[in-house]
């Protein structure tokens, strides 16, 4: 039972999402937890999103409407954070929906544990397909650094919307916004919160439906998205170096690079494969247990690169032509 009812700021950035936005807004309005402010950030939409937001703002006094020029997701999130007044922040993407008791459960867990961040599971929802549970979190409480390690062990997620946050984390720490990186912006935001020693606790119940539509940022991989995907790990490594955490998180950085290298290969973007695989081979020599993360085919790709970079790249081209990656 919740013994106090602190204000929660739900921040929803929206850009040309009028097909899905109404269901998103309704899922927040219908929360069993009522002490909310709902901050809808219209990021220069050219469809009906602005009209929809303004209509709902007239219907519910808890809704705050921000209309701004289109500058991308990181700055849209920041616009919401800058005006938020709640003790806690729940981020929500405009094509996702909160489960009805999500905020009640999150506030209850945060208040009783005196937590800075509550990590929660969720459902993956492909349109026309079945729901898939993200999985139960295996920890009760972690430090921020330990939680970074848990995420990179694939035991949790970077997504800002699955990590309920105290607003004081933004007030008490200098959080940098990186406007030009929108694919991986969750990682950039979360890692800055986590290095500032928050208390992270887990929630046992799923809180939302993560809906995957063709228009989602995580949909088809354009050249621009690929460049973004390449840019965010570089930013992360530079940030950790500035914070003096490179040595402590050396294995975790290697894990991130390993994951992203094979993601790029599976996307059939091979232009950086040679450079990436040189580092993969080096890191696997340092941390051979990371090979357990690889599929049999990925291990074969590594094995050929260990023999010869030239042969390794030819092998990748062959796999690509055969449709095996």
Image (cartoon, rainbow, N blue to C red):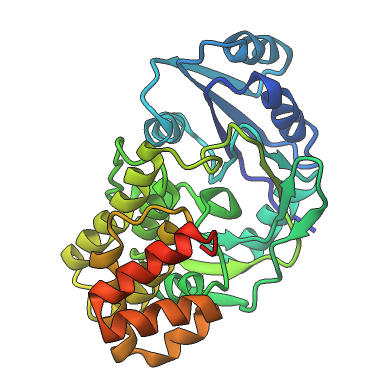
Report which quarter residue 290 is drawn in.
bottom left
Image location of residue 21, percent across then percent down? 67, 25
Q: Quadrant of residue 240 in the image?
A: bottom left
Q: Is residue 283 left or right of residue 9?
A: left
Q: Position of residue 175 (x, y in %)?
A: 31, 48
Location of the N terminus (image quadrant): bottom right
Q: Is residue 198 visible?
A: no
Q: How many marks?
A: 0
Residue 252 position (above or below residue 58) = below
Name the spot of residue 259 as percent of width and height, x first: 43, 68
Q: Residue at x 57, y 67 (%)?
A: 156
Residue 112 point in image, percent of width and height: 66, 65
Of 207 and 35, which appears nearest the observer?
Answer: 207
Q: Nearer the viewer, residue 277 or 224?
A: 277
Q: Is residue 224 above or below residue 118?
A: above
Q: Above or below — where is 25 with respect to 270?
A: above
At x 69%, y 36%, the residue is: 35
Lateral position of residue 76 relative to residue 178, left or right: right
Horizontally, residue 277 falls left or right of residue 139, namely left
The residue depicted at 31 percent of the width and 63 percent of the height is 273
Residue at the image position 30 percent from the left and 90 percent from the top: 285
Please say whether residue 158 is visible from this viewpoint.
yes
């Amino acid at each position: 039972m919740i013994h106090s009812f602190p204000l929660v700021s739900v921040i929803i950035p929206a850009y040309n999402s009028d097909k899905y936005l109404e269901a998103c807004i309704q899922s927040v309005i219908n929360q069993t937890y009522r002490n909310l402010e709902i901050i809808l950030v219209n990021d220069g939409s050219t469809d009906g999103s602005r009209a929809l937001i303004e209509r709902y703002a007239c219907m519910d006094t808890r809704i705050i409407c921000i209309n701004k020029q289109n500058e991308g997701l990181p700055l849209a999130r920041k616009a919401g954070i800058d005006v938020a007044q709640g003790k806690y922040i729940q981020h929500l993407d405009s094509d996702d929906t909160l489960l009805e008791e999500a905020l009640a459960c999150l506030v209850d867990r945060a208040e009783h544990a005196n937590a800075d961040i509550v990590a929660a599971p969720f459902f993956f929802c492909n349109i026309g397909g079945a729901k898939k549970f993200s999985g139960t979190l295996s920890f009760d409480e972690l430090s921020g650094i330990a939680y970074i390690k848990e995420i990179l062990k694939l035991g949790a997620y970077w997504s800002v919307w699955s990590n309920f946050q105290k607003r004081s984390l933004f007030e008490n720490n200098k959080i940098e916004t990186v406007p030009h990186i929108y694919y991986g912006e969750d990682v950039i935001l979360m890692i800055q919160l986590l290095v500032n020693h928050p208390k992270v606790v887990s929630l046992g119940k799923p809180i939302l439906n993560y809906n995957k539509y063709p228009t989602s940022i995580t949909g088809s991989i354009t050249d621009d998205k690929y460049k973004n995907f390449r840019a965010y790990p570089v930013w992360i490594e530079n940030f950790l170096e500035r914070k003096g955490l490179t040595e402590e998180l050396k294995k975790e950085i290697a894990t991130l690079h390993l994951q992203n290298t094979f993601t790029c290969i599976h996307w059939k973007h091979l232009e950086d494969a040679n450079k990436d695989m040189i580092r993969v081979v080096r890191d696997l020599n340092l941390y051979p247990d990371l090979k357990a993360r690889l599929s049999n085919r990925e291990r074969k790709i590594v094995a050929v690169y260990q023999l010869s970079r030239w042969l390794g790249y030819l092998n990748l081209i062959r796999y690509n032509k055969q449709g095996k990656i």
